[in-house]
Image (spheres, coloured by chain):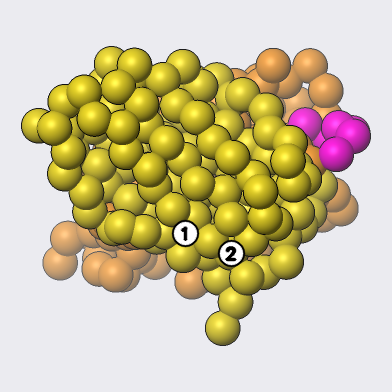
Amino acid sequence: AQSVTQLDSQVPVFEEAPVELRCNYSSSVSVYLFWYVQYPNQGLQLLLKYLSGSTLVKGINGFEAEFNKSQTSFHLRKPSVHISDTAEYFCAVSDIGNSGYSTLTFGKGTMLLVSP
Amino acid sequence: DGGITQSPKYLFRKEGQNVTLSCEQNLNHDAMYWYRQDPGQGLRLIYYSQIVNDFQKGDIAEGYSVSREKKESFPLTVTSAQKNPTAFYLCASTISNTGELFFGEGSRLTVL
């Protein structure tokens, strides 16, 4: 079984500052990794995903994440945040190699609070 | 436009009543999922279905039931056996075996 740990429940940051949201996972097999964003009272939207290939993955809205297999991490970064980035961010993992459709295991989320 | 429609968006019910949440998708996805979201808890899997007329329990299936009679539809019933039904419920679907999900806008259930 997999598990996902998001180390920070809240990250406050000033506008135009850089930010890193941390995610660590645990799995006995190789995994696919995802970051989703959720605005208040809405569903989740995919930010980016790591399936294979380059360990640096670029997503929407200027976000990127780096897969580090040795540290079992998939931290999300943005060099300069905007007020509109205020939202909750979820890291998620699924196992590679399942027959049929996989299920995603989610972390508990990190609330990014951007202030002027 | 293709997408996932959940209804109602907000629902209030008295304790002891069964409630059914609707989820419809026109993405032609085979697999559909129900997640429950509580503050600070992330998303937890309730049920999922990979094909019509078949579904599997997730991590927190007790007190819930589902059906999958059509590819497009995957309704969730919150029964009176669910001890803490007040939550935000999210429906999702996928056509990919990587686990990548497309989500609906959610339904917020409040039990009074």
Q: Check the picture and name the quadrant holding the N terminus of chain B.
A: bottom right
User: In which quadrant of the rendered view does residue B20 lie?
Assistant: top left
* Mark 1–mark 2 CB contact (< 8 Å): yes
> Label 2 neighbourhood size at 10 Å, few (<14), some (14-19), many (20+)?
many
**Residue A3, image x, y percentages:** 59, 21
**Which secondary structure dominates the residues rendered in magenta?**
loop
Residue matched to label 2: B25
B108 or B75, which lies in front?
B75
Q: Mark 1, mark 2: which one is toward the viewer?
A: 2
Q: Which amino acid does label 1 sit on?
A: Gly
Q: Is residue B4 left or right of residue B42?
A: right
A99 left or right of B38 in image = right
> Who's the residue at 83% across and 23% down the image?
A29
Identify the residue at image location x=24%, y=30%.
B17
- The quadrant of the picture occupied by the C terminus of chain B is top left
Q: Give the range drawn in magenta.
A: A95-100
- The chain in yellow: B
Chain identifier of the orange chain: A
Instruction: Write down the residue under mark 1.
Output: B104
